Each structure stands twice: as structure tokens, then as C-alpha cells.
Image (tube, rainbow, N blue to C red):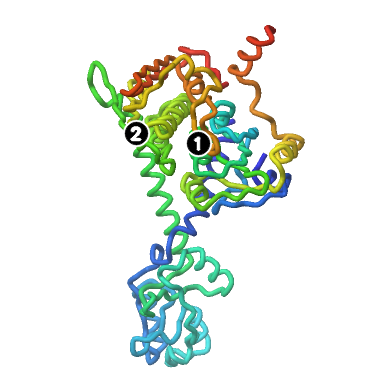
Amino acid sequence: MKLRDVLEIVEGKVISRNTNLDLEVKMGCGADLMSDVLAFTHEGTLLMSGLTNPQVVRTAEMAGIQAIVFVRGKIPPPETVALAEEKGIALLASKYTMFETCGRLYRAGLPSCGLFETSLRRWREFFGEE
Amino acid sequence: MAVNAAFSERKREITRLQELVYELRVRDAMTSKVITVAPQTTMAEFREVLRANRISGTPVVEGGRMVGIISIEDLIKALAAGELNATVGEKMTPRTVTLYEDDPLIHAVGKFSSLGYGRFPVINRQGDLVGILVQGDIVRALLRRMEIEYHEEEVRRYRASHLFEDILADQVTLHLRYRVVGGDFERAGEASSQLKKTLSRLGINPRIVRRVAIAAYEAEMNIVIYTDGGEIVAEVTPIRIHLEAIDHGPGIPDIQKAMEPGFSTAPEWVREMGFGAGMGLPNIQACADEMVLESTVGVGTTLKVIIYLTSGRRASTDT
């Protein structure tokens, strides 16, 4: 899914300058916890987050995430935008909640990041099944 | 897949080209040796000026001030009308639409397409004529810059990826050392960012680079959040990356507890920033092939992580 499709689906706006709307995102992840972003995403993931501090951009950089959608109408401060532009990470905004933003994209065909070994291990340990 | 890769590569280049039109200034593209003519010059003399300099037009200057612009089209019209003895002053376009030398190139692109002129005189902020810009100059400047950038990154990549092959020794180890300032949330992540870039340039598999970057970043955040500072050292060999995050206090009283997912002693302000949820150390462990955490209260903490470069040493959890 291209960023221009994402914008249309969530009725969003672009925040960063020189944003490539033809950028392809392969899957989506919604998280406000940066460690979760690092643990439960892959390269090329679109991140939905309600956090707007510069560390969101750092986290995206480390995880190989090239685009972030800020949910609930949150607008990032200038230092976040500046860092994102320096790192070439696209910033978008959605006025919808995390649930609705993710839901609209999932319904439109953007897949999730899938199941992770760490989650499955905890699952098996607690529920005792495969 | 190969076609797709080539296509997205081209898209990236086009985007970069778009960015460059905003980054580059008119002065980066213009010709600064400007040939000018006076209004009293005859069209026959003007023809010689064009021919001798292989140009297609010039600004017309009188007493140091620009009064108009004259081009090869004006010459052709004069030729057709048999008016080669007419003066430039009579045949020129008396206009002074100019560009400033510090205008972004995108302004020039806009003016070329909206006004339909073939060239623009370029002035500085004092109003002096400092250059001239034709449409071809823009394309040339963009290509030149693209080539330089492409070449620079290519050379960096080439040099870095051949480092291990070029160095003759029984064992080669590359030490990368980064200082981390405690409490400095603004710059937190800089070290990991530089480490990630360097490892990519070394030509290391992107999946491995991502694991090292995530482990380094979580470790760097721990140093920033909990200590007065420390350092991150990466030791790179052709076989493995040995990452060490070292700080000088306060130390972890119960390491086993600290390793439990969800256990955290982070203050509220750290949690508000999306950290301190007790997932940092478990995350590092998930990225690592081997991990050792040593800590003495009041002395400091050393975290050692080993990630192998050769595939198959470990079933990856992130696929």
C-alpha cells in the first residue's frame, strides 16, 4: 500500500516536507510503547502511534520503519519533524483514534506484522498448547 | 523481484531529485561568467557575440544597470526583417525579471514554466548582476549533484565493505566506540544511529544490522535513563559483532528481576516517553545470540551482547 492510499483511507494529512507519497508500506503496527515497536515490527512497517517525541523517530530509524502516522489528531513538535526530515522518515497525521486508524487500514488490506516467537512462547507457557 | 527492486531504486532517485530542487540554490546552477552587451551594440555585432561565445542570449547593461535582455530569437527576427544595423536597445525585451542567487532552484523552475522565458539574469541581494541561468543549467546542476552523492556513498560503501579483505592479518577486529551522555534525551539514540549506518556501510546483512541496532538502542536508552553516562563499544570481526554497553553506576541490585519482562524501575516521565515498560532487556536478549549482564551496585553495569554475522548460527525470532 502506498502512502497516498494511506492518506486517503485515514483522511490524513502530511506533516514532513519532501514526503514521497509513492513509498510502499508492507504492513502496519500500532503502538505507544517504543520497545514494542522494536520487538514487533519488520522493515517496511507503517507505524501508528500517539507518541510524538523525537524518540519515536529514533525508534523508527532503528527498526527500519520509513513512515509514521500520528493518531488522535496529535501533531509532533518541531524537533520531531526536523529529525524525521533529516532521517528521511515520512510523518503523517490522522484525526481518528488508534483503533479506528488501524482498523481502516486493516480493512483496506494492510496486513499486520504477524505472530512473533516471543509472544508464542509466553502463550504456550501459560496455556500449555501448541 | 529484480524488476521491482530496480523500480523502487529509480523511485528513490526521483524523490531525491525532487528534494534537490529545493536544496540547491540558483547560484549552484547558474553560469557566473556573464557576457553582456550595451544598448548601442548593433544586431550584427550581437550576432558575433553569440557566435564567439556559443550562447543564445545576454542581458543588456547600460551604466552598470540591467535594462533588458536580448536573445537569438530577436536576432532571427532582425535578420528576417533585414535590420542587422538596428541597435540592441531597439530590439531587446525591456524587462528585468530576475532571480536572486540565493533563491531555491524550485523558484527558477516555476518562473521558467510560468513566464516562458529562455533565460533569467541572476542578481545578488545588492542588485548586482552575478550570473545567468538557462533551463539546461538546472538539469546539469541536478545531475552533477546526484552523481557526486551517488559516487560518494558508493565509494564509502566500497571502501567499508572491502575493509576486511584489504587488511592482511591473521585476525582483523574493528573497534567502534561511542560516548553516551546520561539524562540527555534529546541526543539519545545518536550512538546507535551512527553504529547502524556504519554497519550498513560495511556491507553487513540488513537483518543482522537491524538486530544490532535494536540491541544497541535499547542499551543506549538504559544508559541515558538510569545512569550518568557511559559508552557503547562494538567490536566487529568477519564472524561476529560483540557489543558492549558500559556505565559507571548506579548498578542493578537484582539482575534476575531486571530481566523479567514488564519489570521496571523507570520514573513516570520516562514512561510517558514510551520507554521504561520493562521490555528493554528482554528485547536485547531476543536480538542477541549470546548475552551477559554484569552489575555491581555503586560501581556500574556492563552488558555484553554477541550477534553472529554468519547465518544459521541461530534461528531468527524476527522472521
Residue plotted at (43% across, 60% down): B24
Residue B6's quadrant in the figure? top right
Mark 1, secondary structure of its residue = helix
Label pair 1/2, CB-CB below 8 angstroms: no
Residue highlighted by disc 2: B229
Numbered circle sitting on residue B270: 1
Mark yes or no: residue B86 visible: yes
> Viewer-proximal residue, A28 or B278?
B278
The outermost residue toward the right is A107
Q: Mark 2 falls on what kind of element? A: strand
Measured from the top left, where is residue A45 in percent x and y?
60, 34
Relative to A3, say whether A106 is above or below. above
Q: Is residue B156 above or below residue B24?
A: above
B213 left or right of B8? left
**Residue type beneath disc 2:** Gly
* B110 left or right, relative to B197: right
